[in-house]
Image (cartoon, rainbow, N blue to C red):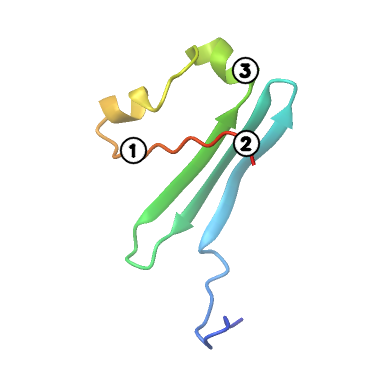
Amino acid sequence: MTGGDGAREDPLASISLRYQRDADGLRRLEATRRPDGGILIEGQDLGPGVERIFGAGLTGSHLREAGVPVEFCNRIGD
């Protein structure tokens, strides 16, 4: 398979690890292989289940404590 520029696309470059939507909210997790060989892990946890476990307003404290570089983006609305 090739992309619009004729370059060969890697069908395993991105994979959905989790997509779950229920009464507790939405949990999504994806992994993508970057061109430099690194792996980008992106996720989103929304809803009452998250706040019930971690409390309101938690923004990646556990990952930072483990030394994982974290970028936080918060968007509300359309």
Q: Which residue is label 1 attached to?
A: 70
Look at discs 2 and 3 and give the one toward the viewer.
2
The amino acid sitting under disc 1 is Val
Tell which circle, 2 or 3, labels the residue nearer the N-terminal end: 3
Q: Which residue is label 3 attached to?
A: 49
- Give whichever of 5, 34 is nearer the camera: 5
Residue at (69, 20) in percent of width and height: 24
Specify the quadrant that holds the C terminus: top right
Q: Residue furthest front?
A: 78
- Give whichever of 17, 71 is nearer the camera: 71
Can you tell which quarter of the image residue 12 is in?
Answer: bottom right
Residue 63 against residue 70 in the figure, above or below: above
Is 67 left, or right, of 49 in this rendering? left
Disc 1, SS: loop
Q: CA distance from mark 2 to mark 1?
A: 23 Å
The amino acid sitting under disc 2 is Gly
Specify the quadrant that holds the N terminus: bottom right
Residue at (68, 34) in percent of width and height: 20
Q: CA distance from mark 2 to mark 3?
A: 20 Å
Could you say where residue 5 lies in the image, as x and y percent from the top left? 52, 86
Tell which circle, 1 or 3, labels the residue nearer the N-terminal end: 3
Can you tell which quarter of the image residue 66 is in?
Answer: top left
The amino acid sitting under disc 3 is Gly
Q: Which residue is label 2 attached to?
A: 77
- The answer to whether the residues at label 2 and label 3 have Cβ atoms under 8 Å apart is no
Q: CA distance from mark 1 to mark 3?
A: 22 Å
Disc 2, SS: loop
User: Callout 3: 10 Å neighbours few (<14), some, many (20+)?
Assistant: some
Can you tell which quarter of the image residue 52 is in?
Answer: top right
Tag shown at residue 2: none
- The answer to whether the residues at label 2 and label 1 have Cβ atoms under 8 Å apart is no
Residue at (62, 17) in percent of width and height: 49
